[in-house]
Image: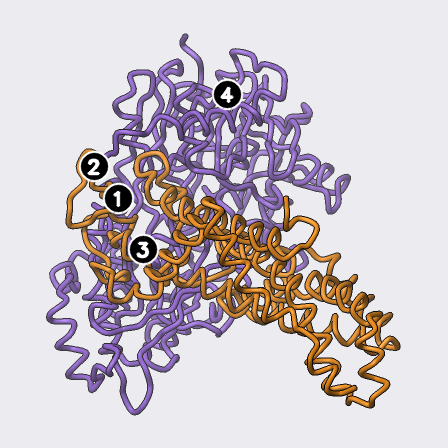
Amino acid sequence: MTVTSFKRWPWLAGALALGATMAAGPALAQNTITIVRELDSNNYDPHKSTARAASEVLFMLGDTLVSLDYDMATIKPGLAESWTVSEDGKTYTFKLRGDVSFCDGKRMTADDVVYSLKRWIDPETKSPVRWRAGPVEDIVAKDPQTVEYRLKAPFSEMLYQLTQSFAVVIDKANVEALGNDFGVKGFNGTGPFCWGDWKPRNDMTLKRHAAYKWGPPIYENRGPAGVQEIVWKIVPEEATRLAAVMTGQSQVTQYVPFSGYQVLRRNPQIRVVESKEAFWTNFIGFKLDKEGVSDPEVRRAMVMAVDQAAMSKNLFFGEVEPANSYISRDALDWNKEIEGKLPRTNVEEANRIIDAAGWARGPDGVRVKDGKRLSPLGYSFSAPQFRTIMEAVQGDVRKIGVDMRIQLFDATAGWGKLATQEFDLFALSFPYISAGDALNLYFRSGNIPSPNRMNFRDAGVDKLLDQGMTAVDPADRAKAYGEVLRQVHEQNVWIPLFHEPMKVAASNRLAPIKAHNIYGCGLYKGLDLKFVR
Amino acid sequence: MRAALAQLPLRRRRGASPFLGRLLRDRLALAAALVLALITLAALLAPWLSPHDPFETKPIPFQPPVWAEGGTADYLLGTDGQGRDMLSRLLHGTRLTLLIAVLAVALGGGIGVLVGLFAAFYRRLDGVLMRLADVLLSFPAILLGLAFAAVIGPGMGAIIVALAVATVPDVARITRGAAVMIMGQDFMEAGRAVGLPDRTLLWRYLALNCMSSVFVFLTLRFGQVILIGAVLSFLGLGARPPAAELGMMASQGRDALLFAPHISTLPSLMIVLVVLCANVLGDALRDTLDPRLRNT
């Protein structure tokens, strides 16, 4: 990558812009950490938002029964100090810690846990992530310290799902007092930080929970938190966020543009912390019943036309891992047997495949069959990363005569547009814990039209997903999900693009931190955040 | 009487030559005209002048221009974030930007002139047409662009319609103002007295005599339309990728401002240049055609 010689003034512009927005308030004390990020959530109700922006705050505001280790595979204690699973895999019994209290000082009991989990699955809550709670039969408090979670059928993902922010314990009295303003004007949780003040699309201030001492064992500091206050500051412009980190106005963030890491690594004041696990995958999905892309050979050719390695190296500065699999190969239940069979970039072969499928090049170079031009319409978001992805894929498939059209939407309109049947392909990225987590989300026919935006309908796959989900033996689960992985890869339902490893840029005024990858929230509970100078 | 009317000099025939004469004397206007002509010619010949395919992505993104460290003569103005040749995209982008502006000004100007003329000629329509123009005037062009993009989807169509609609009320008001003055002239009364049909009076005498002020306004408006069009494209409401359009190109380069500023600054400079030239030319035209400024 060549860097031009005149590169100083954008820094100044970015720093000035940031200064104007940040210096407006009073000078922040040494024990306040400012984290810049791109987007805000529309609310902080754990059952009503699927946004990463909500989860990264909720992990700090609340706690879950169990926690997830940095390896993204090992379940560790959380609010429950121990748990047992019945032999049939249908009953989970959690033994709670006795020393947990909410931010308002009230003691947390099994009733609070039951209320929280039942609100999650209550049809009235209309939670978009209700399915993550599994096929619940009932959740009961056996005594103030014991919760029994009964399922109608085994759910192999159960404990992993219970580590997510959707499963944080909330306070019934607080929810009822705030009504629709719960998670908007306040939130009484048991997390290492308490709700301070939220100015939507501007900042979210969290205050230290002084009584906190029940953090997950993956942290050396189990509580209370090392800083008095955390300010999550919304800075939409990439260059301005980078300037904020460079100038020390933000001490830690995972929202640095890919182009900025090279600069940050050369800066002695900053360290870039990386997590090996890249459980956040970017992909293009095909709507399988749309003309043109419904042809499996067209999809195969398009998959082979895309050069993921060049995309990673040239457009994302080598900071992402090129992907030819739909999930990371480090993810739980990945099928190693299909690795050798995954399509590789080969434009010549892609042209041959699409020729053989009867799509001939027209006078303008675009493929035509039976009078129909191969001109699929792609939807995605207007955020820089998706725009880059869409244009790169557009350029790549143009080499095989596919005239891909692009329509990009702001996040506010984009999710609605992506739930329609208007488009032929779409670009998205998603976090997952395991193969089962990813596959159940995207490939169940019951999840059409969203999140199964491909309209992928296969009774055999649905059956395998059921088998995987209800498997009691991990080997059976891996076998079922492995087979689904084989089938969806074979059908070229997606074009996998890259896996995004978690990278966090932190000031060296902070003690060393470790990057987590849970739901793409690099700071997880923030218990390792503290100033050392 | 009809013969006498036929002798009435039409402003149309006098407009061009003093303008050219003045243009040749005014060095700034001449320079602006030459630069604009050159840019327009380059834009028109873009498919033949472009050294590379403007849509072809290559594995050489963010390559700087030839004068910067790391630049090569193969890509005189460097490449963009997808490895596409900046010079070729700049030529095609200018072409598309000019096309959008010309279409929007022609469409909006045409409708505006009609509205203004009818309002002045048929006085009973005046109130309704001008109130409609007032309503349109209360919508900023960017808001109109957003509204049209929401209704017909983002793209060239939405941007042209939005810019044209935003142009209509201004042109209608200016045309009406000029036309109302001309309606009070003796020759219009005389035309009516000898029984000339409305069509002849409207087009041959009223319209042609209003044209100078409308033309000046449209020339100045051309620059504004390019600017607003670029803003709409910058916001993602205009041309769709991989098409090249100056506003969109400036927007795409925003993320690389830190290490590849040429991607954003080159199309921005082109916008500045075109708008500046259009404004200087518009000013010169106004100076020539406005009798109060003609001798200053």
In the picture, residue A11 is in which quadrant?
top left
Give me the C-alpha separation between circle 1 and circle 4. Answer: 34 Å
Looking at marks 2 and 3 on the same chain, the residue that comes earlier in the sequence is marked by: 2
Instruction: Please provide percent x and percent y for residue B180.
Output: 81, 68
The reply to the same-chain question for discs 4 and 3 is: yes
What's the CA distance linking mark 4 and mark 2? 34 Å
Task: Mark 1: give few (<14), some (14-19) or many (20+) Cα within 10 Å.
Answer: many
Compared to residue B3, the image places residue B188 above or below, namely above
Query: For numbered disc 2, what is the local secondary structure?
Result: loop
Where does the image place residue A240, in percent across and percent down from the top left?
Answer: 45, 32
> Which amino acid type corresponds to the residue marked 4 in the rendered image?
Ile
Which residue is identified by label 1? Answer: B62
Labels 1 and 4 positioned on one and the same chain: no
In the rendered structure, which amino acid carries the disc numbered 2? Thr
Mark 4 residue element: strand
- Label 2 CA crowd tier, 10 Å (few <14, some 14–19, many 20+): some
Instruction: Name which residue type carries label 1.
Output: Phe
Give the chain letter at badge 4.
Answer: A
Q: What is the drawing colour of chain A?
A: purple
Secondary structure under the numbered disc 3 in the rendered image? helix
Res. A2 mark: 2
The location of residue A327, given as percent across then percent down, is 29, 54
